[in-house]
Image (spheres, coloured by chain):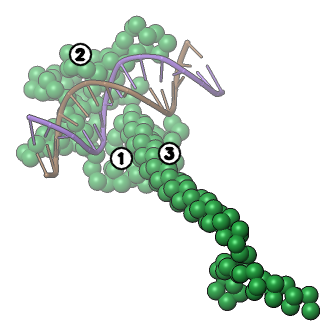
Chain colours: A green, B purple, C brown
DNA sequence: ATGGTCAACGTGCCGG
DNA sequence: CCGGCACGTTGACCAT
């Protein structure tokens, strides 16, 4: 348990959902968890300002005041620098060991829990994006196969039609391949006989 | 008003 | 048993 969390433990009671995590191995028994957002205030534009930079630890009286003034929790917005550093570190490792986590948290003036949560959420976002990409790829593959299937069916139909035509033609004439245009040509009996005799000579 | 984003949380599962 | 993670959810904030 980190110091900052320890000192504000119990202050989230009555702040809506969250604020409790199960004690390991004891599902029924709950312990209050530090409400991390208590270190944030609203800027004039309504944007949450991270006060952790100069106030990591907070006192009970501080939090009492926060509790009274702000019933609802404030949403932490990570600064651009914090986000980009987290992103960079995620590019290197999608999971962090406790030492790395702590070091990064210290570097970013965040709590290890916040870094941990950020990485969990980041992994979830990556996975979501990946499945979306895979879905699109499969959709495309499916469309390609469908198109190919259509094309092959059409080709098959043409071949069958051609075959029927050939059978009908062969009753009266012989088909052969024209050497110049590479198309099937119809030979009458007389010509056929001529070619055959030339072949023998 | 409403939908999207995202930090934070609850819970269950798994490996050590 | 415990820590860490995935997954689903909540709620604050923001853009439209």
Badge 2 and badge 3 in a common chain = yes
Q: Residues within 10 Å of mark 2 (few under 14, many from 20)?
A: some
- In the rendered image, which residue does mark 2 sit on? A13
| Residue A120: x %, y % from top left | 43, 37
3D distance between C-alphas at marks 3 and 1: 17 Å
Say whether residue B3 is left or right of residue C3.
left
The image quadrant that residue A48 belongs to is top left
Label 1: chain?
A
Residue at 19 percent across and 33 percent down: it is A74
Are the residues at dot 2 and dot 3 in contact (C-beta closer than 8 Å)? no
Q: Kindly identify which residue carries mark 3.
A: A94
Q: Quadrant of residue A193?
A: bottom right
Q: Are marks 1 and 2 on the same chain?
A: yes
The residue pinned by badge 1 equals A108
Q: Residue furthest right?
A: A201
Viewer-closest of A141 and A107: A141
Q: Residue at x 68, y 64 (%)?
A: A167
Q: CA distance from mark 1 to mark 2?
A: 28 Å
Q: Secondary structure at mark 1?
A: helix
């Amino acid at each position: 348990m980190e110091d900052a969390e320890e000192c504000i433990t119990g202050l989230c009671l009555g702040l809506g959902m969250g604020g409790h995590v199960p004690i390991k191995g004891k599902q029924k028994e709950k312990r209050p968890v530090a409400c991390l957002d208590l270190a944030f205030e609203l800027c004039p534009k309504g944007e949450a300002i991270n006060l952790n930079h100069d106030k990591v630890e907070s006192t009970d009286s501080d939090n009492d005041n926060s509790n009274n003034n702000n019933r609802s929790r404030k949403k932490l917005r990570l600064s651009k620098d914090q986000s980009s550093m987290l992103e960079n570190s995620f590019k290197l490792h999608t999971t962090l060991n406790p030492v790395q986590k702590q070091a990064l948290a210290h570097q970013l003036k965040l709590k290890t829990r916040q870094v941990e949560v950020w990485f969990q959420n980041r992994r979830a976002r990556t996975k979501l994006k990946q499945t979306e990409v895979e879905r699109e790829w499969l959709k495309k593959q499916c469309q390609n196969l469908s198109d190919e299937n259509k094309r092959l069916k059409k080709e098959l139909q043409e071949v069958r039609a051609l075959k029927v035509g050939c059978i009908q033609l062969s009753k009266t004439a012989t088909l052969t391949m024209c050497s110049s245009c590479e198309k099937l040509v119809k030979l009458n009996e007389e010509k056929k006989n001529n070619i055959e005799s030339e072949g023998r000579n």
